[in-house]
Image (spheres, helix red, strand yellow):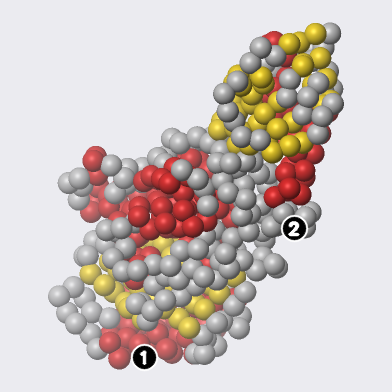
Amino acid sequence: MGSVFMTKDRTIIIILTIILLDLVIPSVGETASSSAVISVVDQLLQSHRLKEAHVGIAVRSLREETSILNYNAQKYFCPASNEKLLLTLAALKDLGPDYRFKTEIYVKNGAVIRDGILYSDVLIKGYGDPTLDANAIGEVFTHVPEFKGINKVAGSLLLDLSYFDDTFWGPGWCWDDDNYYIAAIAFKTTRFLLTSPRDPIAYLQVIGQQIREGFSDRGITFTGGVKAARLSTGWELVAEITSQPLQMLLQSMDYFSDNFIADQVLKSLGAHRYGQGTFQNGAQAMEESLKGIIHSPIQIADGSGLSRYNLLMPLQLVELLSYAFAHPTLGLNDQGLDFVELRNASSNGQNLFIQALPPWGGGTLSTRGYELNAYAKTGTLTNISALSGYLMTGTGDVLVFSILINDVPSVADARGFQDDLLVVLKERSR
């Protein structure tokens, strides 16, 4: 769990904020002056030097099914990696937790092997596996029984990248952000530093060389070069590489806020629904999947949250998180569950969505202060900080919250405000 570091002044501010919130935030069946609530939040913002920042907050009690706090909750913000919350739910709904990415290896029908030489091209067709390793392709190939002992391929290495388009760079990405190529065959070790992100021919040669090196490490060379191709008739599938189940990949994605996994999954969503993986198709697939869950327009540009074009309201994230809490298996078995059953599913690792989120003190939350019983997703870009998730209270309630902060001069100040607000909410709920 995170260590507790708090100055005397900060302790006093939190205590006063708890007292004031007790006075102005209503209990069930009561109403409060919205101006009074805003005044209290403004004081906490002032103490963290955030008065000039664009701040939005939505908090809801899931037990009481009532709003606890709304502060600019229906204004739009760039959510940074809180975008991954939408992607996580859409991927679980559309692809399913047991979905596995695949990569296929083909040789020509009737290919001849003589004196350790395979007389055929080798074709690799990718389907967007974010965990694919260049060395794994050569390793899997050499484990095919009929190919043992091969030391040369008398042919070319053909790569079929057609499952995704050749737009490797997300809309609204900045050059100084942590960017990878998003492609049907992609390796996390391949960065934009190697070549232009808009040059598919150069990219093909870069990843082709990495794959050839994986074969070479196992004593296999190619007489031909690296070429683009599309799978057609006349090819024989000789091996297939499959990823871990999607549920495990989403856990890694959210726990470490992995941008590469996120946008590979986004394009896969687009391909699954519309036939080809593009940023536009992936964004549209997410919007379609979330219809009826989020009840107002959203603007989606990518899955990772790197894009500054993403726009969400805190209230929309609370809507999504509330739905995910109420549908632990995202299926028919969720019908008729009461709050206690849903809360137990969340705490026992039986909620597929919440299981993907890091607990407080883990993953990207490992450096946060205080000890809280919470599951949440962080989001950070230059001048942007976001935090949304679930806070379990001492009274058995679950508060779903979203705190989005844009135009912030110090991300550290924003995180301090987010942490302090959660402590205030936790203490008020005792």
Residue marked by disc 2: 196
Q: On screen, 109 above or below 249?
A: above
Would residue 22 appear left or right of 92 to someone viewing this image?
A: left
Q: Is mark 2 on a helix, strand or loop?
A: loop
Assess disc 2: are there few (<14), some (14-19) or many (≥20) residues with their C-alpha within 10 Å of its C-alpha. Answer: some
Q: The C terminus lies in which quarter of the figure?
A: bottom left
Assess disc 1: are there few (<14), some (14-19) or many (≥20) residues with their C-alpha within 10 Å of its C-alpha. Answer: some
Query: Which residue lies at the image location 70% right of the left edge and 14% below the top edge?
Result: 111
Q: On screen, 397 above or below 50?
A: above
Q: What is the x, y in percent for residue 133?
A: 68, 37
The answer to whether residue 368 is seen in the rendering is no
Q: What is the x, y in percent for residue 23?
A: 27, 85
* Residue at the far top in the pictured view: 115
- Residue 65 found in image quarter: bottom left
Q: What is the x, y in percent for residue 216?
A: 83, 28
Looking at this view, is 319 or 304 the one in front? 304
Q: Which of marks 1 and 2 is in front?
A: 2
Query: Which residue lies at the image location 41% right of the left edge and 62% below the top edge?
Result: 389
Q: On screen, 381 above or below 167?
A: below
Q: Marks 1 and 2, Cα distance to the nearest angstrom?
A: 50 Å
Residue marked by disc 1: 39
- Residue 361 found in image quarter: bottom right
- Amino acid on which the number 1 mark rests in the picture: Ser
Query: Which residue lies at the image location 69% right of the left edge and 67% below the top edge?
Result: 175
- Amino acid on which the number 2 mark rests in the picture: Ser
State which tag comes first along the sequence, 1 or 2.
1
* Residue at the far front in the pictured view: 233
Query: Which residue lies at the image location 30% right of the left edge and 90% below the top edge?
Result: 36
